[in-house]
Amino acid sequence: MRHDHIISAKQLSRADIEEVLDRAAEVAADPEAFADRHENALLGLLFFEPSTRTKMSFTAAVKRLGGDVVDMGTVESSSVKKGESLADTVRVVEGYADALVLRHPSEGSAQMASEFVDVPLINAGDGAGQHPTQTLLDLYTIRESAGFDDLTIGIMGDLKYGRTVHSLAHALTTVDADQHFISPESLQLPRSVRYDLHEEGATIREHTELEPVLSELDVLYVTRIQAERFPDESEYRAVAGEYQIDAETLEAARDDLTVMHPLPRVDEIDHDIDGTDHAHYFQQAHNGVPVRMALLDLVLEGQR
Ligand code: NCD
């Protein structure tokens, strides 16, 4: 893979995607073989927004490759509190680490920050923009469960602010999937994303109800309404609690429907689905470790 920085799913070709997923499958089959692959490598963690899965799985990944993290910690405990700019922070931290992982509330921040550093910078979520490493673990999960051939996927929930959706939609276009987008009208895909998908030749359809398309789906990807991104709380309240699924909803689905969610969930997926064969979201979260190990392996290998 020939990328210094991993900023957007738009930069990933089909060959890039297959390379990361194949490497992740090798890691999952024999993690010990990768145990000292990047001894002494240091990954700089810059998380300006809350994170559980992304931060912990990046940490687990670099440690399982023989490396370690240097972590800025919370915004409150860092010099950001003193008014330091993002550009200055990344310029300093690149001197402490072999690669950087950045999560930030502003869309475009990862692209901007990457222009100030020479070490690889990985976007772990820039506001409502992109979340490309989530997409890679989503694709790994889809390839394992449903495969990419003749794939029909429904993506439901907050399509406007959900960065995991914006990244995933580009990658699904790259692997030629049929995409159905299900959301309230107020939370449809941003026009810019829809425009890019059309330019890339995507097959997409938009719906306000799940029911008419549910039986066609191989995968249903459910997302959380991104409360923290709404400029107006009343706008959030108007849509909160919509688009929930439970075991009864799935009676109309194919028996082999794969249900995914980037997590955290609030109330979109009822707990009565957790014990069914449809539920792939915890496995999906676990796939974050081999997939991020594979990505770090490729990115750090490229640095040598
Ligand atoms: C997602 C995110 O941060 O965009 N979480 C994650 O990384 N798994 C999804 C979300 O917060 O809803």
Image (spheres, rainbow, N blue to C red):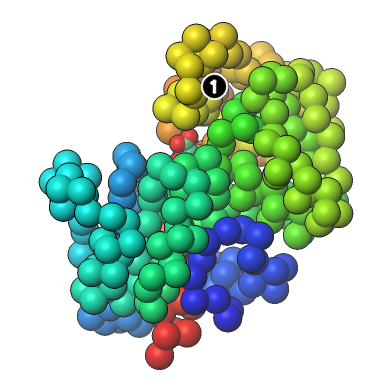
- State the image quarter where residue 219 is shown: top right
- State the image quarter where residue 63 is shown: bottom left
Q: Quadrant of the N terminus?
A: bottom right
Image location of residue 74, percent across then percent down: 21, 45
Image location of residue 100, percent across then percent down: 35, 66
Image location of residue 110, percent across then percent down: 45, 58
Identify the residue at the far bottom of this view. Answer: 304
Image location of residue 21, percent across then percent down: 59, 66
Can the viewer see residue 127?
yes
Residue type beneath disc 1: Glu
- State the image quarter where residue 264 is shown: top left
Question: Left or right: 206 with respect to 13?
Answer: right
Write the residue at 65% across / 25% down. 187
Residue 13 vertical position relative to residue 284 in the rendered view, above or below: below
Residue 87 vertical position relative to residue 169 in the rendered view, above or below: below
Write the residue at 84% across / 34% down. 205
In the image, the residue with mark 1 has its CB under 8 Å from the nearest atom of ligand 1:
no
Towards the viewer: 212 or 6:
6
Residue bearing mark 1? 268
Q: Residues within 10 Å of mark 1 (few under 14, many from 20)?
A: many
